[in-house]
Image (tube, helix red, strand yellow):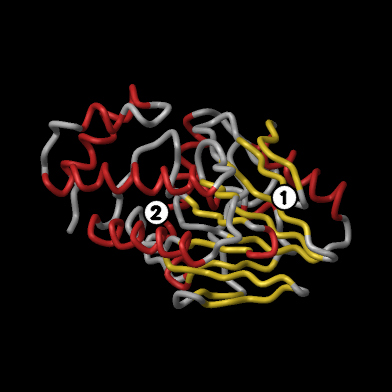
Amino acid sequence: MKIQYRNDGITVFESALYRTTCTVISLAQSVLIVDPNWLPDEIDFIADYVQQHYSGYAQYLIFTHSDYDHIIGYGKFPNAKVIASEKLTSNPRKQEILKQIEDFDNEYYITRNYPLAYPAGNYSILTDVQTLTIENTQLIFYLAPGHVTDGLFIIIPSKNCWIAGDYLSNIEIPFVDDNLKDYILTLTKAQSILDQYKEITILITGHGDLALSRSEIHTRIHNDIAYLQCLVSQNDENITEIINRYSFHFIMFDAHEKNKTSRRF
């Protein structure tokens, strides 16, 4: 499995599918594992990496949201404590999401060496700026609805990093699977977060490349807002230029059409 980034206790793995990321962050005697995914060999690689480098450490699984590709590795880490939004752990679509995993595995004849299950939370995030201290490291959480209803931003000031889930990608336009108004508000919140936390220099998104400078993070926020403004105005005059800013722009036009037909305010 590709390791996209490794520095200062942060390791970012990248799946062969949709360039989906999983982040592992080491503390003194604890390890944070964010969205372990996709294929069985890839999840085994992540688990083996954690065992090899952090054997005996307390494990914490963090889920940025409930899309099935992001929770698919939950069962591989049975001893981990789970951190997720309250909306994720109480999601009424749990069985539907598990069915999506089963359908994916059946379509490609995939078998897994761990049970498929929906995450049960040990720590539920209910509000913006909710904090959790693990050892001496502070994690700051913000609710991030819009893509889906149960998204989270995670800020770790001591690591200078921001884990954004399926927001602020350089390869995908915003996928508005839940609510357009909420998505716009989440991007407004994103700009406020960047302004408030001057130490943030690393943005880890759920698909694609990390942003490794504040200027690049700002550019991503700007691009996503510009795209959503076109969606709101229903004006496609500048849409080609905007979508071409994303690496996989040639398939993003189909995603744009889906956003237009499923637009929710």
Q: Where is residue 31? Give x, y as percent.
A: 76, 60
Instruction: Point out the tag, 2 or 1, that comes first from the N-terminus.
Output: 1
Q: Nearer the viewer, residue 210 or 110?
A: 210
With 216 as the anchor, is 259 left or right in this view? Answer: left
Tell whether label 1 touches label 2 (CB within 8 Å).
no
Q: Helix, strand, or loop for circle 2?
A: helix
**Vertical placement of residue 189 versus 37, above or below:** below
Quadrant location of residue 209?
Answer: top right
Rendered residue at 66%/40% (across/down): 13
Q: Amino acid at mark 2?
A: Glu
Question: What residue is disc 1 on?
Answer: 10
Badge 1: residue crowd in 10 Å (few <14, some 14–19, many ≥20): some
Q: Where is residue 221? Give x, y as percent.
A: 39, 49
Question: What residue is disc 2 on?
Answer: 96
Q: Amino acid at mark 1?
A: Ile
Rendered residue at 41%/66% (across/down): 91
Q: Where is residue 105? Give x, y as percent.
A: 52, 36
Position of the N terminus, as image quadrant, is top right
**Vertical placement of residue 65 versus 220, above or below:** below
Rendered residue at 43%/48% (across/down): 218
**Vertical placement of residue 265 versus 130, above or below:** above
Q: Where is residue 141? Give x, y as percent.
A: 52, 69
**Vertical placement of residue 78 versus 112, above or below:** below
